[in-house]
Image (cartoon, rainbow, N blue to C red):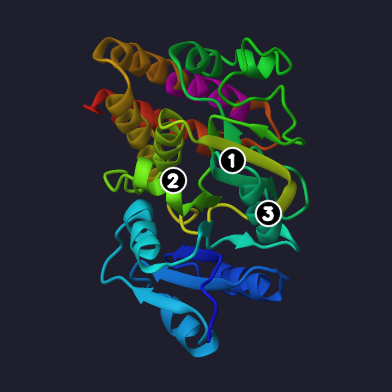
Amino acid sequence: MSLRPTISVIIVSWNAKNYLHECLESLFATACAFPLEVFVVDNASSDGSPEFVAENYPQVNLIRNESNLGFSKANNIGIRSSTGTYICLVNSDVKFLEGCIGKLAEFMQAQPKAGIAGPRMLNSAGVVGRSCRGFPTLWNMLCNAIGLDLLFPHVRLFGGYVLRFWPQDSNRSVDILGGWFWIVRRSALSDVGLLDESFFFYAEDMDWCKRFKMKNWSVEFLADAASIHYGGGSSARAPLKYYIQQQRADFQYWKKHHSKPARAVYFMICLLHQSSRAIAHCVLSLFSENKESHALVASRNWQCFLWCLKGAR
């Protein structure tokens, strides 16, 4: 008789076959003392991803969506199909490192008020990435827009959003865990609910963590567990499109969780952020050796600034 899985691993994939291959290989090569079930939810990939999974990983529960349903809805489909006590939602461009899932599950067992937790994020070179943030406020978004958090990275007063003053090398409760790798307590979902499917891509992490905290479930960062996140597995092919989509999702978050006057001020801060970045990178493109890179960033920020002016809500 098969044991009920302790952990359900759900991987949403869209046209990221090579990343998905490494993700699954590293998952099954990683020792875990807890019974697992694994789901791949494919958002109508055209690169052969679902066929590859079906042929090479018969132990994976493959769910094929007929269209790209977005991050939140695809994950919710996987959650509804899963049975584990804990649910791991993992991006397809993640490489599991030894012990990561087990340490997260052990932490959740020891901390009954932890609703959601996440590991330390490493890049391909093993450098720690920034996977935690503070909830956005008018003050910390202004500090971010005018670069005070960059000029004074060790000053907490200016760094409340990106948290540059904290090297993310210690366990602690946080506001927001980036959505690249979560472990979620199933019993908490009856309070919090599933991911908000109106968020197609981006900002669902801010919204979900906000809702966990509102229901008195803690959001925890576990530096003792780590995995690699390559980043941009699906979005790298259209950076401008996804950059604007991220700004759109941020507006959506503010509309859901903040007052109309606050949203109006935030809109002006966004205009300041995009225009100042566009000007700064344009100037840098004139004098830096890396001219092309700065020119691309300047163009991206300027296009987003124009998009905001044309009626972003």
Query: Depth check: 180 or 236 in front?
Result: 180
Residue at numbered disc 1: 292
State yes or no: residue 276 in magenta. yes
Task: Name the residue type under label 1.
Answer: Glu
Residue 279 in the image: state x and y as whole percent: 50, 20
Residue at numbered disc 3: 106
Q: Is residue 80 left or right of residue 217?
A: left
In the image, residue 146 above or below residue 102: above
> Residue at point 59% right, 40% down?
292
> Residue at point 30% right, 32% down?
252
Q: Is residue 138 left or right of residue 285?
A: left
**Where on the picture, by quarter, is residue 177?**
top right
Q: Range of the magenta residues?
A: 274-285
> Residue at point 45% right, 77% down?
49
Q: Is residue 55 left or right of residue 229?
A: left
Residue at numbered disc 2: 188
Count of marks placed on residues? 3
**Where on the picture, by quarter, is residue 67?**
bottom left
The numbered dot on residue 3 is none
Q: Could you classify mark 1 by the number of other residues whose Cα lies within 10 Å: few (under 14), some (14-19), or many (20 or more)?
A: few
Residue 237 in the image: state x and y as whole percent: 46, 56
State yes or no: residue 70 in magenta. no
Answer yes or no: is residue 229 visible: no
* Marks 3,2: beta carbons within 8 A: no
Q: Secondary structure at mark 2?
A: helix
Residue 23 in the image: state x and y as whole percent: 60, 68
Taken as a whole, is the magenta stretch helix, strand or loop?
helix
